[in-house]
Image (cartoon, rainbow, N blue to C red):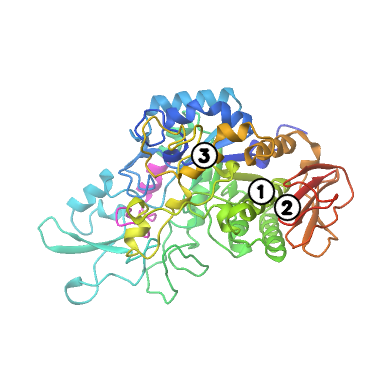
Amino acid sequence: MSSQQREPWWARAVFYQVYPRSFADGDGDGIGDLDGVASRLDYLDRLGVDAIWFSPIMVSPMADHGYDVADPRDIDPLFGDLAAFERLIGSAHERGIKITMDLVPNHTSSEHPWFQEALAAQPGSAARNRYIFRDGRGTGGAEPPNNWQSVFGGPSWTRIVEPDGNPGQWYLHLFDVEQPDLNWDNHEVFDDLEKTLRFWLERGVDGFRIDVAHGMAKPPGLPDTDVEMRPRMLSDGDPRFNHPNVHEIHRNIRTVMDDYPEAVTIGEVWVFDNASWAEYLRADELHLGFNFRMVRAEFDIADVHDAIENTLAAAAIENATPTWTLENHDVERGPSRYGGGAVGLDRARALAMVTLALPGAVFLYNGQELGLPNVELPDEALRDPTWERSGHTVRGRDACRIPIPWSGDTPPFGFSASPDSWLPMPPDWATLTVEKQLNETDSTLSFFRHALEIRRARAEFTGNRVEWLAAPRGALVFARGDDGLRCALSTGKRAVALPDGELILASAPLIDGKLPPNAAAWLV
């Protein structure tokens, strides 16, 4: 195979999402940081991941924990500084681990110099034209320009006070009030993003996860909608997202990325129609796109089968690489989502095996390899802006963002030298620490390490072919590649016979040679 035909590094990569506030604290303030991550690189190396994806670490007031960026070309002091990040990139590369980081092009922080300049400027000015300012409707412009709602709850418009002290224009924010949307019809906006892309790529970053990659472009005239807009609920047909002009933005981004041929772009694409989703993966747009069908699937044979089929079909439309993920910082953790307790954990492990057996790239979320569940927090501990924006009706995403338990028998379990972590850690996590799980051959951590080792080492995990095989009731079985890997998943109430082949891994002990309920197996 020539170098031009060589498979890119990301095509079969296991990406590990680090939520930096919650991974490891290096300076003892109770909040995770870059030096904390650097101190745990050997752990990630031994786990067997190929790349780290950092949730936002750029300068931010942290209204939305970093997704409100005030300076996209510097590191927030909460996490360290540029020198610490450059050291981390070098240390990761020495271990063969790539570094990707979050990019937030849809909006900025309200503390970004551009937005502060816009507030001080006049309606119709060049400064305001970098954002989406509009006059209000109704008497004296007292009503919002349209009826759109914020993804976090409440109106997506906020009225400003003009420099003369009078009520003035409104600005659009599809997320928090402190996250004003940029005007992507203004060429200055892309010119600035290009500076950001090159700034990080020149420092050795291996790519970007693009936040709200289906956003940015807005429909002309910003018309009212009759689509229901509930907090954190997205659907096809939502006028706030997936406007056709967004593809020109991605083509422009790709033009920059092509100057760095080893780097990757990964789009957060909450689009559910296969053909529409695939448009983002055209040869001159994104390299990879998150497909969230497995996140949305129930632990049910038909649901899992449909999620796999649609993910593969969507990627095939543009001959793109499929992606698989079960957890991230925005969704309920797998063990809780699949029923809670031992059953939920068994199911989470089984579905992890299914995704790791499929062709393409896999994304793990920090703590997934420990089997961490969601944590029910008291109201006063909640930090997600959704909690306030929804009028305390939607609890937000804090429950899946609890810091990682590393060692010891009491909180904060080696996460920090401070006794208080930014989100409280439950005492019963003493059984889930990295330290304890490393010493248990049947722990979830040992299971993930073994699974990733097998996936990396065996030829059966190459190739793109997936073939569905006959399976007992309550099970599904597929073959992967041309070398005979078989993956079986059991979701029924009884143990089922395994397909022919040599068993190389099971997510739970067999029962009389059969696969128990809520389990998966690999055979060759």
Mark 3 or mark 2, earlier in chain: 3
State the SS at label 3: helix
Q: Is residue 285 above or below residue 149?
A: above
Q: Identify which residue, 31 or 379, lies in the foreground.
A: 379
User: Dot 1: what SS?
Assistant: helix
Disc 3/disc 2 C-alpha distance (Å): 25 Å
Q: Which residue is mark 1?
A: 349
Residue shown at 63% from the left, 29% from the top: 46
Give the residues in magenta: 173-194
Residue 177 in magenta? yes
The amino acid beneath tag 1 is Arg
Residue at coordinates 78% horizontally, 34% vertically from top-left?
A: 1
Label 2: how many residues lie within 10 Å, few (<14), some (14-19) or many (20+)? Answer: many
Contact? badges 2 and 1 (CB < 8 Å): yes
Left or right of 287 in this view: 393 = left
For disc 3, the marked residue is: 430
